[in-house]
Image: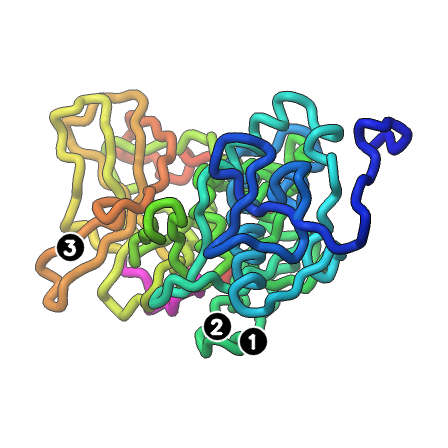
């Protein structure tokens, strides 16, 4: 930043100033906070989230990662405003840098940050509308570091969670609790690096929704909208894929034999509010074959996921059956979780409750009777950390 430029001189008469958290008027100069004006650190120069640690620092960052960071940052300040009443401009809280949004970003980055901070979403425990202590850091190890329940709650939303796309073992930037800023970018890229540069740096899955990252890093929480009466935006049943063993990249195409089953091995995380009981939840799929009249659901094909507590992960198999009359060619396999009723006679897809599934590219190919299925799967490189 050019500190010699008089337009960006540091104009404050004292070390105590005021800065607005949210922009609710559409103007960069508006200031507002939940649930009332935050008068501890105030400036007329812009909105806190645009000049704070939600900013990208390596060029164009996926919008989902920017929004996830903005929601975590907003929640952190809401919590301090609600319970602590003290915040300063240091790395102990958030290092707000005046004019960083105006000076350090190009127009494309500014647009991404504006879009990422636009909606006033924040994180709460599942049973209250109060903001959580949304700890986060630049980078975390695998697994993330467990935090203690806060003084205002005995619910531990800062649990240690498997994060196989995290930094190299032992590397920690911050306290390792909650959101990993660079980790969220890795999930949004589908790379093992937060600055993807190498062709072999891909991961097997990619998340396109900020809610997937937030519910991954903060256990058992809800996301609410401060502009809509603190309405809950997240369903109670949620999941994310952490890894699919047969994929080298998120865009790989899996080949499916026309005369037999294909089995995928997936590691999934329970990112919802409640624990998954035994023989109550399974990972299945809703296919779109080249012939749309074919059945989209295969309810008899059950792949039960082991009992999994909220925040924990488990590895399971998904057996994909191709209908006899399926045409050869491209298909989409949409992985989705199902919740069964007590006697197992009926189920509900998680996506029916508003949570995203996960799409995989597939191709139906003709297989001879004596050809092993494995020949038609992509070559698998099992590099990187393995999720147990």
- 360 on left or right of 381: left
For the residues labelled 2 and 3, the Cα–Cα distance comes to: 30 Å
How many residues crowd mark 2 within 10 Å: few (<14), some (14–19), many (20+)? some
Secondary structure under tag 2 reads loop
The residue pinned by badge 2 equals 156
Residue 197 on image: x %, y % = 70, 31
Q: How many marks?
A: 3
Q: Is residue 122 visible?
A: yes
Residue at 14% of width from left, 63% of height from top? 341
For the residues labelled 3 and 1, the Cα–Cα distance comes to: 36 Å
Mark positioned earlier in the residue sequence (3 or 1) = 1
Foreground: 269 or 29?
Answer: 29
Residue 92 on image: x %, y % = 73, 62
Q: Main secondary structure of the magenta part?
A: loop
The residue pinned by badge 3 equals 347
Mark positioned earlier in the residue sequence (2 or 3) = 2
Quadrant location of residue 255? top left
Q: Quadrant of the N terminus?
A: top right
Q: Which residues are magenta?
A: 304-314
Residue at 68% of width from left, 44% of height from top? 43
How many residues crowd mark 1 within 10 Å: few (<14), some (14–19), many (20+)? some
The residue pinned by badge 1 equals 148
Q: Measured along the vertical axis of the image, is residue 276 above or below residue 181? A: below
């Amino acid at each position: 930043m050019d500190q010699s430029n008089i337009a960006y001189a540091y104009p404050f008469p004292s070390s105590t100033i005021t800065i607005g958290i949210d922009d609710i008027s559409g103007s960069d100069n508006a200031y507002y906070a939940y649930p009332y004006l935050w008068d501890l650190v105030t400036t007329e120069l812009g909105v806190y989230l645009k000049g704070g640690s939600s900013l990208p620092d390596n060029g164009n960052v996926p919008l989902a990662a920017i929004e996830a960071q903005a929601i975590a940052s907003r929640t952190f300040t809401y919590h301090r405003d609600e319970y602590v009443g003290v915040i300063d401009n240091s790395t102990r809280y958030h290092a707000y840098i005046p004019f960083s949004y105006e000076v350090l970003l190009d127009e494309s980055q500014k647009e991404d940050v504006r879009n990422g901070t636009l909606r006033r979403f924040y994180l709460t425990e599942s049973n209250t509308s109060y903001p959580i202590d949304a700890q986060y850091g630049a980078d975390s190890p695998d697994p993330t570091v467990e935090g203690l329940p806060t003084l205002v709650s005995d619910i531990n939303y800062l649990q240690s969670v498997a994060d196989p796309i995290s930094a190299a073992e032992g590397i920690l930037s911050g306290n390792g609790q909650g959101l990993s800023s660079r980790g969220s970018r890795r999930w949004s890229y589908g790379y093992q690096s937060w600055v993807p540069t190498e062709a072999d740096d891909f991961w097997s899955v990619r998340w396109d929704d900020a809610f997937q990252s937030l519910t991954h890093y903060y256990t058992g929480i809800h996301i609410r909208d401060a502009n809509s009466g603190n309405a809950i935006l997240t369903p109670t049943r949620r999941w994310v894929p952490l890894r699919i063993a047969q994929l080298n990249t998120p865009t790989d195409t899996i080949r499916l034999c026309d005369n037999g089953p294909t089995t995928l091995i997936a590691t999934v995380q329970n990112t919802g509010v409640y624990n998954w009981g035994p023989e109550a939840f399974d990972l299945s799929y809703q296919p779109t074959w080249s012939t749309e009249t074919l059945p989209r659901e295969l309810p008899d094909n059950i792949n039960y996921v082991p009992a999994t507590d909220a925040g924990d992960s488990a590895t399971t198999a998904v057996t994909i059956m191709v209908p006899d009359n399926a045409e050869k060619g491209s298909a989409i396999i949409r992985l989705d979780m199902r919740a069964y009723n007590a006697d197992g006679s009926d189920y509900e897809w998680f996506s029916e409750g508003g949570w995203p599934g996960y799409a995989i590219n597939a191709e139906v190919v003709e297989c001879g009777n004596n050809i092993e299925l494995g020949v038609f799967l992509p070559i698998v490189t099992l590099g990187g950390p393995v999720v147990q």
